[in-house]
Amino acid sequence: MSSDPWGRVDETGTVYVRTADGEQVVGSWQAGSPEEALAYFERKYEGLVVEIGLLEKRVKTTDLSAKDAQAAIDHIREQVDAHHAVGDLEALKVRLDKLVETVEARREERKQQRAKQSDEARHAKEALVAEAEELAQSDQWRSAGERLRALVDTWKGLPRLDRKSDDELWHRFSHARSAFSKRRKAHFAQLDAQREDARKTKEKLVAEAEALSNSTDWGPTAARYRELMADWKAAGRAQREHEDDLWNRFRGAQDVFFAARSSVFAERDAEQSENLKLKEELAGEAEKILPVTDLKAARAAFRSVNERWEAIGHVPRDARPKVEGRMHAVERAIQEAEEAEWRRTNPEARARAAGLTGQLQAAVDKLKTQIEAARAQGNNAKADKLQRELDGRQALLDQALKGLQEFGG
């Protein structure tokens, strides 16, 4: 018979292992010596030790699932409980029990981690839904559409929740995207209709602009082009593929008209600049007539200048007041000379002036006599009153005498 601290082999070849519950039969050995029998079953024990050690390492260092870890523990425990090895089987059981505790702790930790991840995923998805529902009301079609597409990608990267919660949130998320797409589609449909109306309006404006491009009715046509431009701006934009072509035609028609007008105006401006020089020379000639000493000669000279003046065409508008003002000044001077001559040579007016002067002179002489008499009588109050009346009559007399002198006498 052979034995060691954890087992023995009896004379029949039966191998035993010592446990807390007493000896347990391990197996029967007939192929060799008892020592070989113990060594064989001790190696089986070492194999279990190695297997438990590897499992402990996997549980601690890998992401082995709790289910697979427990299955591995149960498989080893069956071998330990079957007593098919010689060694400290109780120590193995203790290690397996501790390993079960570790797996359970890892299971609970992962459960809590999954619960945390699920909660975070729920909050993340609720935030995505809230943002999507806000974006559904946006009119920033490009940026909102891009953001909604980015939210879909973010959603796909998040863990699924329980089916009910996930389906409810996805329904809201999908509904928000659909609402935005529907609004955007309606907006662009309306925009397309507006652009088609703008195209039709601008086609008409282009047709009229092209019809006017050869007009020589410069003022009214230029005014109409300004109105057409205002109508163009008010019409809004046509479709992109039409807008540039329509604008080029519209602008081209205007360019034809305004280029022709500019050419004509340039010729006219050159002609008017030459006219201005001629009229300035005539104004200088007219100014030499002054002062008027011979009215008849002055009239003839001015008439000659004026006839040549009238034969000259237009001058630039901004220069017109100054050069015409010089001619008008000479004309007014001659007219004033004519009026003075008329007053001087008019016999009826001269007679009326002489008669008035005589009457005023008589009144002045009479008042002087009355004043002298009043002062001789010592009646100064009466004399002062008569003096004030005399002063008024004397002023009128002086004025009448001045007018009479204008008649030459």
Image: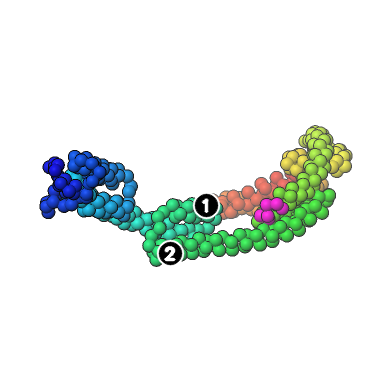
Three-letter residue code for mark 1: Glu
10 sits left or right of 275 in the view: left
The x and y percentages for residue 123 are: 36, 57
248 sits left or right of 303 in the view: left
- The picture quadrant where one finds residue 313 is top right
Residue 239 covered by magenta stretch: yes
Give the mark, 2 or 1, whose residue is nearer the N terminus: 1
In which quadrant is the N terminus drawn? top left
> Which residue is at the front of the view, 35 or 161?
35
Name the element at disc 1.
helix
Q: Which one is closest to the eye, mark 2 or mark 1?
A: 2
- The picture quadrant where one finds residue 6 is top left
Marker disc for residue 167: 2
Residue numbers of the magenta segment: 237-243
The x and y percentages for residue 357 are: 71, 50
The x and y percentages for residue 315 are: 79, 41
Residue 231 covered by magenta stretch: no
Name the element at disc 2.
helix
Q: Residues within 10 Å of mark 1 (few under 14, many from 20)?
A: few
Q: Residues within 10 Å of mark 2 (few under 14, many from 20)?
A: few
Three-letter residue code for mark 2: Asp
The x and y percentages for residue 240 are: 68, 52
| Residue denoted by label 1 | 146
